[in-house]
Amino acid sequence: MNIRPILLLLIAALLTGCAGFQLRGSEPLPASISPVLVTGINQYSDLYRQLEYQLSASGIRVTSSKDDAATVLKLNQVKSSDKLTAINSKGKGVEYLLAESANMSLYDRTGATLVSERKVAVDHYRYALDTKQLSSERAREEKEREMQQLLAQKIMRTIHYAMRTGSN
């Protein structure tokens, strides 16, 4: 048995680990921002639930009380769009651009800016190849939920990057 390839792989893994390699987005947010009050969206919306999940996965508690909050995550101009981008030879829509966006900012309890307002957006092309309206609508709803999840992840990455680099 030739042990050389295994040894080289082990050395490469060791060097990668020693160089400080981490999976993207795997660093937690600072504990000092907990608990967070999320404002500007309905607490029963998919985006709110996704943000709550993402924050709690990072060890950050979400609160509904302004008095309890260490920070406020303010969202505004939350928009969803579904634009037709292509039609087939029969005049039926076959391609759509789905987009989700929001302006977000993060403040501490005194109102000092931790992350200045910036637009966060995600988009995705959806192809409507199915002729059954019901299954097409279900697929659209599932894609919207997925887009909310992606938007929440992007908001989390934006907060993390801005706080890590000090580029509020």
Image: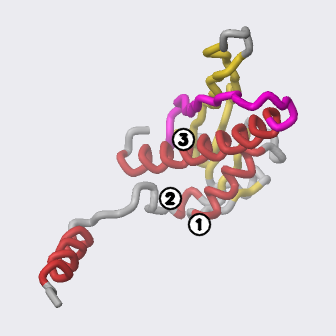
Q: Residue furthest bottom?
A: 1
CB under 8 Å between discs 1 and 2: yes
Distance of label 1 from label 3 (alpha carbons): 22 Å
- Picture coordinates of residue 76, whole percent (x, y): 68, 30
Q: Secondary structure at mark 3?
A: loop
Q: Disc 1 marks which residue?
A: 59
Q: Dividing the image into 4 quarters, which one contains the N terminus?
A: bottom left
| Numbered disc in front, either 3 or 2 | 2
**Badge 2 amino acid:** Leu
Q: Residue furthest right?
A: 134
- Residue occupying the point 57% across, 37% down: 105
- Picture coordinates of residue 111, whole percent (x, y): 60, 40
| Numbered disc in front, either 1 or 3 | 1
Which residues are the magenta region? 114-135
Q: Secondary structure at mark 2?
A: loop
Q: Is residue 130 magenta?
A: yes
**Badge 1 amino acid:** Gly
| Circle nearer the N terminus (1, 2) | 2
Q: How many marks?
A: 3
Distance of label 3 from label 2 (alpha carbons): 18 Å
| Circle nearer the N terminus (3, 2) | 2
| Circle nearer the N terminus (1, 3) | 1
Q: Which mark is residue 112?
A: 3
- Residue occupying the point 70% across, 29% down: 129
